[in-house]
Amino acid sequence: MTKIDDHIQSFDNHQRDKRIKKYLNLFLALVISSSLYIAYIIRYTNASNKITQYSSGISYETYHYGLLKCEEIKRIKPDNNQIQDRRRNPRFVPGTKDILFKNARILDGIGHDFLGDILLKNGIISEITNIDENDIKKNDINVTDDTVMIDLKKKFVTPGLIDMHSHAGLLSWPFLRATNDINEETDPLTPFVRVKDALNPSDPAIRIISSGGVTTSLIIPGSGNLMGGEGHVIKMRNVSTLSVVDMGINYGIDPSEEKEWRWLKMACGENPKKVYALQDRIPTTRLGEGWLFRKKFQEARDHFKRQNDWCDSASKLSSNNNVQLDSPFPEDLQYDSLMALFRGDARLNIHCYETNDLEAIINHSLEFNFTITALHHALDAYRIPDIIKRANSQITIATFSDNWGYKKEAFQASTRSPKILADAGIPVALKSDHPVINAQHLAFEAAKAHHYGLDEKLSIASITSVPAKALGLNHRIGQISIGYDADLVVWDSHPLSLGATPLEVYIDGIPQFGTPNSVLSGKSKCSKGSSAQNEPVKEKGNERTASSVVINNIGKIFVDKDTILEPNNNSSVKDENISMIIKDGLVECIGNCAISNHNSSEMIDLNGGYVLPGIVAIGASLGLIEIDLEPSTTDGFVPIINHPDSVDQVMKAIDGLKFGGKHLDVAYKAGVLSSITSPLSFGLIKGISVAFKTGSHTVLDEESIIESETALHVQIGTLFKNAYIPSVSSQIGLLRRTLLKAVFKPTKRNIYSKVANGLVPLAAHTDSKDEIASLIRLKQLVKRHGGDLRLVIIGGAEAHLIADQISKNNVSVVLSPSRPVPSLWTAKNVLTGSPITNTTGIEILVKHKVKVAIGVDNSAWTRNLVWDAGWAVTNSKGLLDEKDAVALISWNLEEIFNLNRKKLNNQGLNKGNIANFVAYDGNPFDLHTKVKLVAGGGRKDILIDPIQD
Ligand SMILES: *[C@@H]1O[C@H](CO)[C@@H](O)[C@H](O)[C@H]1NC(C)=O
Ligand SMILES: *[C@@H]1O[C@H](CO)[C@@H](O)[C@H](O)[C@H]1NC(C)=O
Ligand SMILES: *[C@@H]1O[C@H](CO)[C@@H](O)[C@H](O)[C@H]1NC(C)=O
Ligand SMILES: *[C@@H]1O[C@H](CO)[C@@H](O)[C@H](O)[C@H]1NC(C)=O
Ligand SMILES: *[C@@H]1O[C@H](CO)[C@@H](O)[C@H](O)[C@H]1NC(C)=O
């Protein structure tokens, strides 16, 4: 230090203080290890005499500042793969008790599955024993007296899950303009912005996400920009300081021992060009995207070279007196993150979907010599494994399991893509893109990938060790191994089973939800049929049709709300067989059929599988939208109605239906045989919905339309305000005037009169308990004036808060989505389930005897309706049973919307009916089950072994 003091003596005291501060700051920022500090002193001491002699252009300090920078650049960073024998997690909170788990069924994230004991100590997994059940002399772990001992009784334990694509804290719940900090959309190239500067540590989503077992997330900017900025990896637990830095995974690490990674986010394809087309500036096409990427990478490359050249010259200067430097070390904050990328200190995550986008960005990486760590979303990656392997290092594909169709670049997706990529040797991570998918249910993403063919071990790895590796953190998270961070999840069932829910989540050894040990040591949830070892569903690839079939060995037939047929186990008749005969689209026999004389028909052995009535989808705009963001593929938006007299402008969805699309096909193949679809609208009066068969050919088919005036849909809330109806109060007011007018002056064919007199239901889309209450009040008012509203709430996230009133007033609720999230201000009070809440909205509604059904708001997920229903049941602690699950997605909707009013009662599962059902090769509420055949849905032919794209 004496040299520094000597040199600055000529300055006045004030200046000197400033100088010292500057140097101290410099130390803090750069002299991050003691060895580097010593190197600095030595170099400084040796070089100083020469400098004062030769460096004419730049100041003495500037020169040495540059040398420090060069030092830092050249410093060999630790290789995290070499780190062994970690004894302590820097995030350890003193006072955290040691925990010993006994008898844990350990899925360790790297492919092992064994029974063992685990000791958590100092924030790490400090010991693991593998219990051989037959071994009598158990290898006990030695613990201190105040260690918490928990006998898990073979409950499943996994590493804390890792989500490598999340926007939690950048788009906090509930969404507000004030907390939208996701895209700096003022320039397509903002590699320099940092999540660290924007993240809201108080986003309620963080706790909700951790309740699903996610313990670490890469939080990245959105995809509005080509170069979106720098991400931040956080542990999903709040810290007492509320510091974003303290939440970071790098908190407390020693960079001389552990590499301090940075993470970058970039994006290509539709999003950036859409954002900048609106601003009428480059890029408006992929042409412009490619150019901007290359231009910026070249600029950064030049900067990189200038830095290296400077350091070269500077190092020559210290040994060769003829060289002289007249410019400072080239430093420019705007290139800092790209320098980190070129120097191998930052890991690049790029959002791209289409094959050509993926190829272009890989090409840029070869041209400018940087490494891509992961391609995100990349729904087309499965089609180009060869191109992906052209990269200069192994790329991880961080993708969705079954989200698709929302835009063109997501339209060619395949549910088999994780498996195809894995088979090609490409690492696959599954991620949430929270809040696109509620990251609380990240495990479900892996479970669905497993359903569609990804191996069980790889499915677990896709949310643990694979993302850990892609983040450069596989030395401390993503697996249950000694020395790893004490981030664990204790599950109520196998994590890949339907509705699997954490009982407790440990982050840095700290239990997050205060689950009593008695619960952890208590009985496991009996998850029906969801065994762990099952093979993933195999695509047999022989999808075919038949006009007649005989179905044999049926486990259960859910005929209607009063009838379930199943083999009578008590009966003295051995091997009683439940079967069905379907001939030319009609149910010829059901129950105990004489099947021998039907040799001509294909015989389907269901092996105990279930038969359900055709599933009904509501909420997904099936038949009106093919690709959400492509107007030519949608019906478009109906005129906005602002006046009670504008009844002529109430549009009917039936007039816009288009059949044969991919969404309808996907739904049909999943046994979703009817849809209730309402017109698309930004206004209060959405229009008149149609109920139709998803497999139909045109509206002219005899069987295609179930009910052309199913309900009048209205939508309440901020999204539907406009200059004429600028408030929720004006929305309710307009509805009141409209309905009262219809009561006082009824006109037979007027839709408002039909609604006001209960002939057609009023389906109101809202989540808010207060808006629901206002609608109930309106219903009461109409009744007092002699009318009668059949009120149905669609959405209903907060409906449980007034379940008693909903019940008393005979209002039905279509919960849509079935696992709501507090994403809107008007849906703040949802119950997100265990381990945060001990009940859910649907359970409260059912307890109050409200007529409930389940809707689906994302058309990608109509095929998941049976799982949504099964999820509600498996987590209801016995409140709901299998029959209730079927009701939620079939006959409850038929009752709520009175779909049998046309006496189309000849559809279904009774003898003589037009067949309209789905048969599974097992219990449909088990994720290992597959649709075996689909009958009806507007088609005469029966589809056997359908393949989900
Ligand atoms: C357990 O710890 C005690 C005290 O440190 C020691 O005496 C004993 O040998 C240990 N037992 C085992 C099995 O390591
Ligand atoms: C973290 O959040 C939970 C729930 O909001 C709260 O109970 C707890 O006190 C918080 N912990 C810290 C350290 O702030
Ligand atoms: C991709 O990049 C490589 C390496 O720079 C180059 O040789 C090749 O021509 C490029 N291909 C395309 C299609 O741009
Ligand atoms: C590309 O980058 C790697 C790693 O940083 C380096 O070893 C290699 O020499 C570079 N290649 C070229 C052509 O610059
Ligand atoms: C569920 O939680 C609420 C509020 O914490 C509590 O009042 C209620 O007793 C709990 N119910 C059960 C069944 O544990």
Image: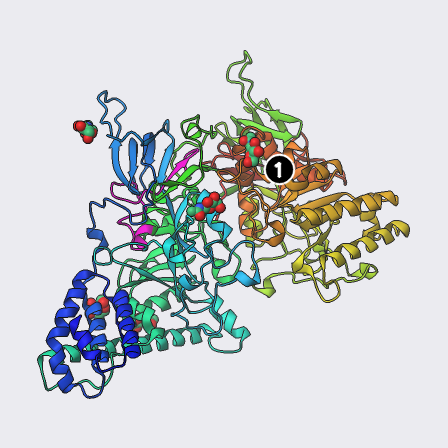
- Is residue 482 covered in magenta? yes
494 or 519: which is nearer to us? 519
Residue located 15% across and 67% down the image: 39
In this view of the protein, can residue 445 be seen by the observer? Answer: no
Q: Is the stretch drawn in magenta largely helix, strand or loop? A: loop
177 or 498: which is nearer to us? 177
Q: Residue furthest right?
A: 745
* 354 horizontally vs 861: left or right: left
Q: Is residue 410 above or below residue 502?
A: below
Q: Is residue 908 above or below residue 195?
A: above
Q: Is residue 597 above or below residue 898?
A: above
**Amino acid type shown at disc 1:** Leu
Q: Is residue 60 above or below residue 547?
A: below
Which region of the structure is painted magenta? Answer: 468-495
Q: Which residue is mark 1?
A: 888
The quarter of the image holding the N terminus is: bottom left
Q: Residue furthest top?
A: 572
Residue located 45% across and 69% down the image: 225
Residue located 50% across and 43% down the image: 946
- Is residue 440 covered in magenta? no
442 or 911: which is nearer to us? 442
